[in-house]
């Protein structure tokens, strides 16, 4: 499973070395969730040593909770940029292949294009910062809930404008809603850094891969042909690792 990566929130409360051991057992890399590392006070040096010890490739998921890169409030946007740069620094220190960044969302329900300029400016500043460090970053297409508005390739391109030709995207398959949208995005997005794989069911996102509205058996040929790295996503606060194991069993049978 060398092209698969374990998203660390699948083991939110497990010891960090146990997470690395689980990834190694299945020959997977990791997407290290920066917020989780801060929450559990995991030292940077410990992560560096574990990456070296277990010889794992890693991605980083940037800080995103409570942050908004296109807030109407300037100070909130500035804070989001500072914290996202912090994640870019964190990723570079770990030798991460890429940083997953959540775009901003509406502060209130205005015409969504009211937020385009703010998001574009944040994208530009973050891309320039990442380029100065030679650190790859990508922006995630979000799920169509609440005040999220960057929920399709069309909106991402509209917001990026002149940045589109240099912008990479993390494609979260569950956010695509159905197989047709998954296939459309895989075909037309010019630069996908990686896939986030989970499912959705009855309005709940990041359900087990084999349980939901996306038919991954039908999607398998296109996903496999893409050759893109796949991050297995989910959130599990129980230390028994049942969600992770369920996803691994499905992938072993299907992929």
Image (cartoon, grey):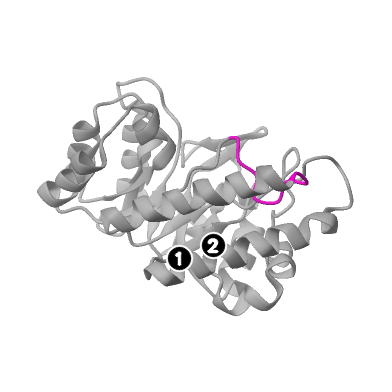
Instruction: Name the residue located 43 percent from the left edge and 49 percent from the top edge.
Output: 87
Instruction: Name the residue located 59 percent from the left edge and 71 percent from the top edge.
Output: 189
> Mark 2 packing: few (<14 Cα in 10 Å), some, or many (20+)?
some
Question: In the figure, is residue 158 to the left or right of 194?
Answer: right
Asked which quadrant contains residue 44, the reply is top left
**Magenta highlight range:** 66-73
Q: Are marks 2 and 1 in contact (CB under 8 Å)?
A: yes
For the residue pair 50 and 10, the one nearer the viewer reads as: 50
Q: Which quadrant holds the N terminus?
A: bottom left
Is there any visible trace of residue 129 in the rendered image? Answer: yes
Q: Which quadrant holds the C terminus?
A: bottom left
219, above or below 67, in the image = below
The residue lying furthest to the front in this view is 75
The chief SS type of the magenta part is loop
For the residue pair 74 and 10, the one nearer the viewer reads as: 74
> Mark 1 packing: few (<14 Cα in 10 Å), some, or many (20+)?
some
Is there any visible trace of residue 221 in the rendered image? Answer: no
Instruction: Name the residue located 30 percent from the left edge and 21 percent from the top edge.
Output: 240
Q: Which residue is mark 1?
A: 130
Residue 72 forms part of the magenta stretch: yes
For the residue pair 252 and 162, the one nearer the viewer reads as: 162
Residue 185 forms part of the magenta stretch: no
Q: Which residue is mark 2?
A: 126
Where residue 146 appears, as percent x and y from the top left, is 75, 37
Helix, strand or loop at disc 2?
helix
Where residue 237 appears, as percent x and y from the top left, is 40, 22
Where residue 109 appears, as percent x and y from the top left, is 86, 42
For the residues labelled 2 and 1, the Cα–Cα distance comes to: 6 Å
Question: In the figure, is residue 197 to the left or right of 145?
Answer: left
Helix, strand or loop at disc 1?
helix
Asked which quadrant contains residue 229, the reply is bottom left
The residue lying furthest to the left in this view is 53
């Amino acid at each position: 499973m060398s092209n698969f990566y374990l998203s660390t929130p699948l083991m939110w409360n497990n010891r960090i070395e146990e997470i690395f051991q689980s990834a190694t057992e299945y020959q997977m890399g990791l997407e290290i969730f920066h917020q989780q590392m801060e929450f559990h006070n995991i030292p940077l040096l410990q992560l560096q040593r574990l990456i070296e010890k277990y010889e794992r490739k890693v991605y980083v998921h940037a800080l995103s909770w409570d942050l908004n890169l296109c807030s109407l409030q300037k100070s909130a946007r500035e804070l989001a940029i500072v914290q996202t740069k912090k994640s870019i620094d964190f990723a570079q220190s770990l030798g991460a292949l890429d940083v997953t960044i959540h775009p901003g969302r509406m502060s209130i329900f205005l015409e969504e294009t009211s937020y385009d300029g703010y998001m574009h400016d944040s994208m530009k500043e973050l891309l320039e910062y990442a380029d100065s460090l030679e650190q790859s970053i990508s922006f995630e297409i979000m799920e169509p809930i609440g005040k999220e508005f960057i929920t399709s390739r069309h909106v991402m391109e509209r917001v990026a404008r002149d940045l589109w030709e240099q912008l990479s995207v993390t494609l979260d398959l569950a956010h695509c809603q159905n197989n047709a949208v998954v296939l459309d995005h895989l075909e037309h997005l010019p630069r996908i850094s990686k896939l986030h794989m989970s499912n959705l069911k009855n309005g709940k996102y990041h359900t087990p891969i084999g349980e939901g509205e996306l038919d991954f058996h039908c999607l398998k040929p296109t996903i496999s042909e893409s050759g893109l790295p796949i991050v297995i996503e989910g959130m599990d606060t129980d230390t028994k690792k049942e969600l992770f194991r369920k996803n691994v069993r499905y992938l072993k049978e299907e992929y």
